[in-house]
Amino acid sequence: MSIGLWAVTCFFGSIGTARADPVELVLRDDSFSISGTLISFDGEIYQIQSEFGQLTFAADMVICRGSACPPLSAPLENILFSGDSSLNSTLLMPLIQSFADHEGYSYQLSQDTAGQITLFDPKNGAARAVFTLSDRNSSDAILDILDDRAHFALTRRGATQEEQTALEKDMFGSLGHPQNSMVLAWQDLYLYSQPINPNRFITMSQLVAMLEEKPRLWPLNAGRQYPVFLEGQADQTLALQQLLRIFDMAKQMAPKGVNTPGRLTVSTDQMPQDTFVQVSLGCGQQAMPTEIQAPAHPLQTPIYLIAAPKKMQNITRAFWAFLLTPEAQDAVRTLGFISRSLKKTEIHGQSGLLINAILNTDRDMRTKDLRQAVLKLNGYERMSLAFHFLEGTQIMDADSLSNLQFFKHLFVDGYFEGRNIMFVGFSDSQGSADGNVQISLDRARAVRATIATLLDDAQLSDGFEVLGLGEGLPLACNDTAWGQNQNRRVEIWIK
């Protein structure tokens, strides 16, 4: 049936029970009409049950006739979030308020229902959307969107493989697609040991070995070595395992009623400093002095917002888009979380990075790669925004896809106007040095091409330079999966 009209036989998400009376949808030039029972209308899309099955029509292309036709005014949107209680109050609710201010809505917090806020049209005072935040752990929040009890899940960790499989059964694409999930912010994870444990300073390599190898043991210190017992809230311990890319770790329970100096507690809260375990980016068993460490805390875990597999309504879609704007990310930073808000560092000011690079390089890395990096990037500023890749590929990981949309907002808003932009690719140390230079260059080109496509104008890529530095300037050691992932990246440098 060719009628020059968008009509598909599937639709995600209705807005309530429709009346059983028939309606007629007519093209605005009266050249075609079709009748059926109205299933749903969300202000933009009609869905009807017709003799041809379920059909969907864009509201701006048709006129609805019949007693069951809904009013054309936008319906009230009820937007349900399920997530961690602390994140709901300290991150999500303030972002909803920032969105309301940005879009010109007035708003009011409910006096009767905790975690509920209503947005009002400033012109006529009509309620336009009600956001309701329910307190749930990550597992239950994901179940809520699977069971159609919430539109979004706010989680302290990524979905497990089992959860990903369940979610992707009904999604438009993979869970990693930007329309289905995003990294909303990052949060530091802190490690704590028992006061009797002398280990207060370990490397990332030692941490991975402690949790991955069997038997799991703390590093030998003062002639003693303790078994490791990982403790903490389920979401936070799983977030640490995902960060370190340890996916098959069985929980090792500490014996009850016995003094266990090997306890390792993971938390997003800062506790008494005498039990804090500092994690270094040094390689192997060699911890780097604190004064020359890279400034970034290595244990930064993503906070995810996962969308239910259904079509978003108008305000819902606008809120989702707002979260990737510079204004929203600045709000995330102001709220005390780690955001995408750009930070610049000149090559001259990167003593920590360069010292890390020299100490962390593998023996077979070519000295000329490091020398070329310094020469080529002289005069440029390194931006904090980066894109990471799956091993041996030009495929960005899921966390990096949201960064593309953020870069687009920055570019359209004129952030880079009058500046030269260089996409600089890096690799891990797997494979040959020559091959790694090539794959790092290919990744830089892939990011440039993807961004040019997002900007919908290939001419914009003419001013984008690319550089591949292979194994040069590693951010972390290459002896763990975490470190290799940190090094497989494309950075943005500007001058």
Image (cartoon, rainbow, N blue to C red):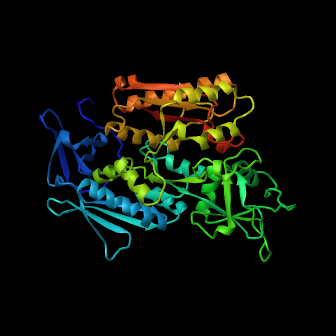
Q: Is residue 306 visible?
A: yes
Identify the residue at horizontal 60%, vertical 56% (top origin).
239
Q: Where is residue 190 in the image (x, y as percent from the top left)?
A: 62, 61
Front residue (pair 390, 468): 468
Front residue (pair 181, 309): 181
Identify the residue at horizontal 65%, vertical 24% (top origin).
368
Q: In this view, does 340 lie to the left or right of 26?
A: right
Front residue (pair 263, 361): 361
Q: Is residue 12 visible?
A: no
In which image quadrant can residue 92 be found?
bottom left
Identify the residue at horizontal 36%, vertical 26% (top origin).
460
Q: In this view, does 492 lie above or below 258?
A: above
Instruction: Return the residue found at the far left.
Output: 29
In which image quadrant can residue 62 be found?
top left
Q: Where is residue 180 in the image (x, y as percent from the top left)?
A: 44, 47
Quadrant holding the N terminus = top left
Instruction: Return the residue found at the far front.
Output: 348
Q: Is residue 190 left or right of residue 31?
A: right
Quadrant holding the C terminus = top left
Q: Where is residue 415 in the image (x, y as percent from the top left)?
A: 35, 39
Q: In this view, does 376 lie above or below 483?
A: above
Disc count in the image?
A: 0
Q: Where is residue 89 in the image (x, y as percent from the top left)?
A: 42, 67
Q: In this view, does 433 lie above or below 322?
A: above
